[in-house]
Amino acid sequence: MAPNSKQVLGLYKKMLEKAYKFDNYNFREHAKRRIHDSFKQNKNLTKEEEITSFYNEAINDLAMLERQAAISQMYTFDKLVVEPLKKHH
């Protein structure tokens, strides 16, 4: 059975959440853009097997994002000029 729209939307949100965990601005923006583009490109899928295939591939991508985000937090770089600095009060 193909995943319903609520499951797909939940997966989209989880993937974006993981993308925001990248410390490096370029990796974070690249991941967000790829996630957005991938879901936008596949939003009109109608065949059950295509939807299931896309969903399963996205689940694998989510696992990869989790691993890569964890690695990016271990090896941090200096902030770029375009990134806002966290304010310490």
Image (cartoon, grey):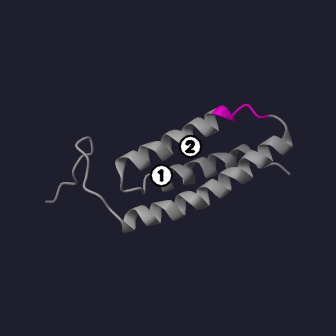
Q: Amino acid at mark 2?
A: Ile
Query: Which residue is situated farthest in the bottom direction here?
Result: 74
Q: Amino acid at mark 1?
A: Ala
Q: Which residue matches tag 1?
A: 19
Residue drawn at the location 69% of the way across and 34% of the way down: 43
Q: CA distance from mark 1 to mark 2?
A: 9 Å
Our reading of the magenta stretch's main secondary structure is loop
Q: Which mark is residue 49?
A: none
Mark 1 vs 2, N-terminal side: 1
Is 31 situated above or below 89?
A: above
* Residue 33 falls left or right of residue 9: left
Q: SS for tag 1?
A: helix
Is 14 situated above or below 50?
A: below
Q: Nearer the viewer, residue 48 or 6?
A: 48
Horizontal and vertical percent for residue 25?
35, 48
Horizontal and vertical percent for residue 15?
55, 52
Specify few, some or many for label 2: CA neighbours under 10 Å numbering under 14, 14-19, or 20 or more.
Answer: many
Is 6 situated above or below 36?
A: below
Dividing the picture into quarters, in which one does residue 63 lie? bottom right
Residue span colored magenta: 41-45
Dividing the picture into quarters, in which one does residue 86 lie? bottom left
| Count of marks, rendered view | 2
Q: Kindly indicate whether the residue at mark 2 contacts the one at mark 1 (C-beta within 8 angstroms).
A: yes
